[in-house]
Image (cartoon, coloured by chain):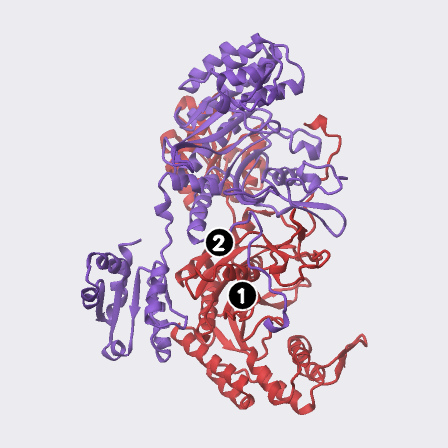
Chain colours: A red, B purple
Amino acid sequence: MTDETQFRPQARAPRGFADKRAAVLRAERRIVEAVSGVYEAWGFEALDTGAFEYADALGKFLPDADRPNEGVFALQDDDEQWMALRYDLTAPLARFAAENWETLPKPYRRYAFGPVWRNEKPGPGRFRQFIQCDADTVGSARPEADAEIIAMAAAGLEAAGLTRGQAVMKINNRKLLNGLLTTAGVESNGQKLAVLRAVDKLDRLGTDGVRLLLGEGRKDESGAFTKGAGLNAKAAESVLAFLKAGAETRGGTLSALSNVIGGSAEGDEGLEELARIDAALKGLGVADDQALFDPSIVRGLEYYTGAVFEADLLIETLDEAGKPMRFGSVGGGGRYDDLVARFTGQPVPATGFSFGVSRLAAALRAAGRAEADAVRGPVVVIAFDQAHMAEYFSVTRELRAAGIAAEVYLGSSGMKAQMKYADRRLAPAAIMLGGDEIAAGTVTIKDLDLGRELSSQIADNAAWKAERPGQQTIPRAGLVAAIRAIVGDKA
Amino acid sequence: MTDETQFRPQARAPRGFADKRAAVLRAERRIVEAVSGVYEAWGFEALDTGAFEYADALGKFLPDADRPNEGVFALQDDDEQWMALRYDLTAPLARFAAENWETLPKPYRRYAFGPVWRNEKPGPGRFRQFIQCDADTVGSARPEADAEIIAMAAAGLEAAGLTRGQAVMKINNRKLLNGLLTTAGVESNGQKLAVLRAVDKLDRLGTDGVRLLLGEGRKDESGAFTKGAGLNAKAAESVLAFLKAGAETRGGTLSALSNVIGGSAEGDEGLEELARIDAALKGLGVADDQALFDPSIVRGLEYYTGAVFEADLLIETLDEAGKPMRFGSVGGGGRYDDLVARFTGQPVPATGFSFGVSRLAAALRAAGRAEADAVRGPVVVIAFDQAHMAEYFSVTRELRAAGIAAEVYLGSSGMKAQMKYADRRLAPAAIMLGGDEIAAGTVTIKDLDLGRELSSQIADNAAWKAERPGQQTIPRAGLVAAIRAIVGDKA
């Protein structure tokens, strides 16, 4: 083949796509497995859809667009229809639910995990493929369905390894601010969206910055002017009072909110929904420090129709400059009652939660959970002599039967390189079975961790060689027990 | 949102892409988990690459092709480079190994599973996305590396649920036939390929058909003529003798082959490799009924350079017409010493095995393993009264804490529809907690399987209603124990 091909391609992955090796995969798989277990225990069933959806089903594009490739990876099928790789797991769920609505048990509760793709500019830590994990209830308008998703998300994060107090679910309801704005005389959707955008910047700009953006607008340090939502002062102050209504307990926030909102039918509806979410969370044993009401939570701009929530990490990590920083949100969700209706024309209420698996894995690393995901290599049987290969294989067979990962070195290098290989694989032990050992019915075992540790204490190289730290020669019949004693310490 | 969107897309998945629900996913995940466990125990480490590779790295296309979309899903990145979704897991491995060769522990042993994509015409049972599971050793020229892959594949299939005798690994070596042809005076690569193509049809055309294709050619029933490889009669007979050299044991086949081959350096090399594979398989405890030598195995036409092997299922299943048929191959592999060299220019020997997860799942269903993958729903708590929702949630919380999947019905339908929902979810039991029960401190439990069974025995509908089969009212404190007794039977 080599001689037939003049052209030699460069070996490189496309920009924004990561190769993941064992340690990263172990961490991500452990998360997915733990969270899937929780979701199944809560009665959610698995679903997996294909990587492609028709572009029109993704909802971002008109079907006659010339090349609908903005933000997604799209291509034209041989029947001329545009398909795109899914950019989240919600759009495929909406398509699936609409396609199978008649035959699904209702409400339809599903969880899903898998890669999603975004055709965006890649950068450090910004990938064009990443794994999401979602759970949604389709076909229930009950606030209890939101509460259940919130409680389950909290249980999932705990199962993934976050301990109580490291994360909190923050809950809000779109109807509150909408109702408040209606009462304040704001009617246009554009103005309401501008208010949401202003509120979304509370973290970054603080109360004074948001006040400017709620009013005429704000000039930043560079002198650039952002036009505001154009609220009058009274309306702006009532929005700011609303944002500050969060209290330590869910009940406290509900009381504070009822003073601030009130009056509009939509606001009252939002309050009633939050009260029912609170009651259901109590039934589910979710305490105030696990899930609280926070009127400043926005979660994107359009799309959601009622309750919104996000999972915030309270643990601190270090930013690139080494300064402590909050990790922030690892996932979010809310109620979206219109997505399935795009297909069917009939309203189908739905609510769900989604988190990024890689981001949660990074959060767990920051929380000190990396240890659990260290990947140990197998026990390595050193290959001295072609004539004894069958014997080496027989040793690995014995070890595997005892539940111990093992391999024979299969390269062509000498003893020294083989020990180095075992070391690089983080093998717990190496097994040496030379002609002398075979003749004597013995086997030599080197505890590689112990060897590393002891050799670091012995300054004199000659002494180290003489002592052979961590090395023992024992009868062949005692092999499995001896290896088990070594590996057992390191499990 | 609904009123803003005039256009209503049709809810349908793109052609050739399947939605997979819980039972299918459970079967596939169980296979992947079991096989991954085996591969890790054998010292192989996980790797996951992104969905896209640069088209030139996939090896099928020249970099200046106008639109390299044949057989793969390809698109042009914003820097004009063509990317394509991976069509197997070997090409990305070759790219990864070449890219990281300097820093990898060598030999590099990796396993991988995940979707691959083929842009082919979809049809019944023919999908454009499916899951493959691969294991490869890169950087070892030893026949023992082939043997290990073969033994591990056999162990993987067994771990996935195939019992001894349901599958066999069939092994061959490209060098045997090549050597034989060289001895017979066949020099051109084209003629050798034509011979391979003829041999590949042995199953379908039998010895006489292959004899014609080895010689001048063959006219089929329709009268269409296929040009043959153009061997003389003596050479054709030696090929046919080679194909029939398979015996019951690996040793027997080796003896038979050494009579048929012999003489050419390449043939002798192939024989020597098979002998070493046999010795290693013995060391690994792989019996003759688990892995045999079969000179008629071809495995595709180009690509492989030495040993080739496939996993054949021996179990019978029924074809679409209801006639018994062999299931055939579920996976295959072999030695490919040139793939990494495409990038590096340096030869890097490699060998591996790949199987289709969905195909193996289908095989396991045919072998009667479907039962294990039946998906039971959660225990369903009937929702009678909004006022008691917190109490219902509290029940699910108790059950989950006891390891029992449970949910509260969250739709808006009445009692009868709720029972039907529980039935459709294959719930083991329904829990009824009405006002009477709550006042009396009791709970009513219905064993849904028992109810179904008993009701089928009671012909009289009125009697059935009076007897309420499988239904019991017990003190609330006994709930978890009672449900555990019901669920325990069905685990």
Q: Is residue A352 visible?
A: yes
- Which residue in the rendered view is the most extreme toward the front? B222
Is B176 positioned to the left or the right of B282 in the image? right
Image quadrant in which you'd find residue A176:
bottom right
Residue drawn at x 66%, y 57% is A72
Is disc 1 placed on a helix, strand or loop? helix
Q: Is residue A470 above or below residue B236?
A: below
**Between residues A452 and B98, which one lies in front from this camera angle?**
B98
User: Residue most toward the top?
Assistant: B234
- N-term mark: 1 or 2: 2
* Nearer to me, A399 or A103: A103
Q: Residues within 10 Å of mark 1 (few under 14, many from 20)?
A: some
- x, y percent for residue B32: 47, 44
Q: Amino acid at mark 2?
A: Arg
Q: How many marks?
A: 2
Kindly report which numbered mark, 1 or 2, lies closer to the viewer in this rendering.
1
